[in-house]
Image (cartoon, helix red, strand yellow):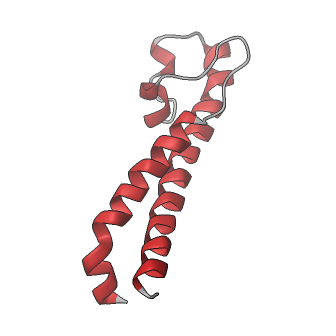
């Protein structure tokens, strides 16, 4: 298994990037606002207080955290999927 990971880790990285991209594209949206910008998603809502009042910030913060978690989950699933497909094709 160690030899497999040494040889095919770049494919796992590509799968992680593609999975994170899908996680970002399919992130949840906020009613009457839409999808949050990348800056708010990647910071988990830390920059919301600079642009919005406290009420709006409280509503958007949960969505920003959920969007970030979808981005991370997509990256993990993409990496594992790419490595799994590579392993299946290598052991035919």
Q: Where is residue 86 in the image (x, y as percent from the top left)?
A: 42, 74
Tell me the residue at 68%/14% (across/down). 55
Tell me the residue at 62%/40% (across/down). 66
Q: Nearer the viewer, residue 29 or 17?
A: 17
Tell me the residue at 57%/46% (across/down). 69
Q: Nearer the viewer, residue 91 or 77?
A: 91
Q: Where is residue 79 in the image (x, y as percent from the top left)?
A: 45, 63
Tell me the residue at 60%/36% (across/down). 26
Q: In this view, does 6 lie above or below 35?
A: below
Q: Quadrant of residue 62?
A: top right
Q: In this view, does 13 lie above or below 65?
A: below
Q: Which of 20 and 91 is in front in this view?
A: 91
**Which residue is the extreme one toward the front?**
92
Q: Position of residue 72 (x, y in %)?
A: 50, 51
Q: Quadrant of residue 15?
A: bottom left
Quadrant the N terminus occupies? bottom left
């Amino acid at each position: 298994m160690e030899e497999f990971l040494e040889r095919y880790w770049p494919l796992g990285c590509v799968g992680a990037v593609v999975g994170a991209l899908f996680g970002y594209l399919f992130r949840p949206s906020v009613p009457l606002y839409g999808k949050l910008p990348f800056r708010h998603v990647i910071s988990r809502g830390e920059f919301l207080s600079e642009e919005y009042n406290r009420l709006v910030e409280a509503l958007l913060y949960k969505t920003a955290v959920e969007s970030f978690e979808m981005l991370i989950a997509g990256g993990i699933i993409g990496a594992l999927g790419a490595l799994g497909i590579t392993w299946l094709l290598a052991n035919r």
